[in-house]
């Protein structure tokens, strides 16, 4: 993936030039996807990068304010007996080592962002035997609903995170679906460090709308299909899709304790001896989806071996 140039970064922030000069001005309507203006005063949003409060309503920032933040986590340094950011090796109270044009938020709380949950699709139970699932070996019955692993990349809009790329792999590891997506709303931050996509790249590759991606998925997913992912609730939210048969590797592998999720990168290294997410150009959603599938196949294999061993011992 090409690196993000200065031109890309400037292009990434272009929607900010249209920030309303008047507080709480409503954005122009954009078909069914735009929210209706509200008359109530906005509640403050908490920036997920620097934790500062900021205000945005109906897709318009009240005022433009730079965000200074650390992208790395705080790590304890035993030698110095203090916490330091892994991104810049600065102490806990140091100012941010990175800057962005605006504050950003996830925008996933229904109460505070009701419009975001419009256009929801729900996977359905097939009325009759469905066609052979994508990517299945010929030895498996065509009535098998399919096991898939997916990973979504997201960018920030004034309404929170929105889908810009989706990758799906099948049980046998084949890459069966790929889409670059045009968000419903203007992007204020391409999140390139993680999404791997700059303004120029998304402009070149994004051909589908969210609705088109939903229709594609409904073509081979049913309510009986099993979906695997890491932090899968985030992927399903930006897809605006309801699906109940899910396996989340961040929950299956609770390495850090019951309330702390372990990164996919750590799990890949520990269990698969595999280095992922190491590129400075961002994450690869195909690689991440495949890693989730490999982790679960390994886990199921280990569990079956343990069950077999236990059964053998108990029978003697």
Image (spheres, helix red, strand yellow):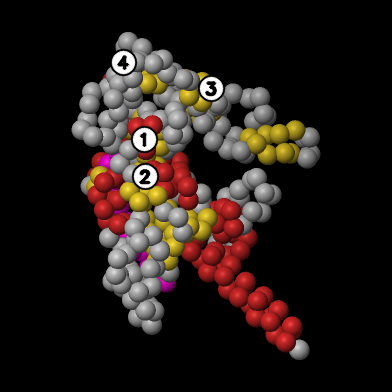
Q: Which mark, by number, is residue 239?
A: none
Secondary structure found at label 4: loop
Q: Few, some or many C-alpha atoms within 10 Å of disc 3 (few <14, some 14-19, many ≥20)? A: some
Q: Quadrant of residue 12?
A: top left
Name the residue rendered at 26%, 46% in the picture. Answer: 211
The residue to which callout 2 is attached is 240
In the picture shown, does residue 42 fall above or below 310? above
Mark 4 or 3 closer to N-term?
4
Q: Is residue 157 shown to the viewer in this render?
A: no
Secondary structure found at label 2: loop
Q: Do tag 2 and tag 4 residues touch (Cβ < 8 Å)?
A: no
Q: Quick check: is 226 in the magenta stretch? A: no
Mark 4 or 1 closer to N-term?
4
In the picture shown, does residue 273 fall above or below 140? above
Name the residue rendered at 24%, 49% in the picture. Answer: 212
In the image shown, does 313 or 17 lie closer to the viewer? 313
The residue to which callout 4 is attached is 25
The residue to which callout 1 is attached is 116
Mark 2 or 1 closer to N-term?
1
Q: Which mark, by number, is residue 52?
A: 3
Q: Few, some or many C-alpha atoms within 10 Å of disc 4 (few <14, some 14-19, many ≥20)? A: some
Q: Few, some or many C-alpha atoms within 10 Å of disc 1 (few <14, some 14-19, many ≥20)? A: many
Q: Do tag 2 and tag 1 residues touch (Cβ < 8 Å)?
A: yes
Overall secondary structure of the magenta stretch? strand
Secondary structure found at label 1: helix
Residue range in magenta is 172-183
Q: Which residue is situated farthest in the bottom direction here?
A: 316
**Label 4 – label 3 distance at C-alpha:** 22 Å
**Label 2 – label 1 distance at C-alpha:** 8 Å
Q: Do tag 4 and tag 1 residues touch (Cβ < 8 Å)?
A: no
């Amino acid at each position: 993936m090409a690196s993000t140039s200065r031109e890309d970064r400037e292009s990434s922030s272009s929607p900010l030039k249209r920030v309303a000069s008047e507080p709480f001005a409503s954005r122009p309507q954009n078909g069914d996807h735009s929210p209706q203006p509200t008359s109530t005063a906005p509640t403050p949003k908490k920036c997920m990068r620097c934790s500062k409060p900021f205000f945005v309503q109906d897709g318009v920032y009240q005022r433009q304010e730079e965000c200074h933040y650390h992208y790395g986590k705080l790590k304890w340094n035993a030698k110095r007996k203090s916490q330091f950011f892994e991104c810049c090796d600065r102490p806990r109270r140091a100012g941010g080592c990175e800057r962005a044009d605006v504050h950003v938020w996830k925008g996933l709380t229904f109460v505070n962002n009701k419009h975001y949950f419009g256009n929801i699709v729900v996977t359905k139970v097939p009325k009759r035997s469905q066609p052979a699932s994508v990517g299945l070996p010929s030895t498996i019955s065509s009535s098998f609903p399919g096991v898939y692993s997916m990973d979504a990349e997201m960018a920030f809009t004034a309404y929170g995170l929105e889908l810009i790329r989706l990758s799906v792999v099948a049980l046998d590891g084949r890459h069966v679906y790929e889409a670059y997506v045009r968000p419903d709303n203007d992007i204020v931050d391409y999140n390139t460090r993680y999404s791997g996509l700059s303004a120029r790249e998304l402009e070149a590759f994004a051909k589908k709308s969210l609705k088109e991606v939903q229709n594609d998925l409904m073509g081979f997913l049913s309510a009986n299909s099993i979906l695997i992912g890491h932090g899968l609730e985030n992927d399903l939210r930006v897809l605006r899709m309801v699906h109940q048969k899910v396996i989340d590797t961040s929950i299956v592998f609770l390495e850090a304790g019951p309330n702390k999720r372990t990164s996919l990168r750590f799990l890949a290294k520990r269990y698969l001896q595999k280095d992922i997410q190491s590129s400075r150009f961002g994450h690869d959603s195909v690689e991440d989806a495949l890693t989730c599938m490999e982790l679960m196949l390994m886990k199921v294999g280990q569990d079956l071996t343990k069950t077999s061993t236990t059964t053998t011992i108990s029978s003697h």
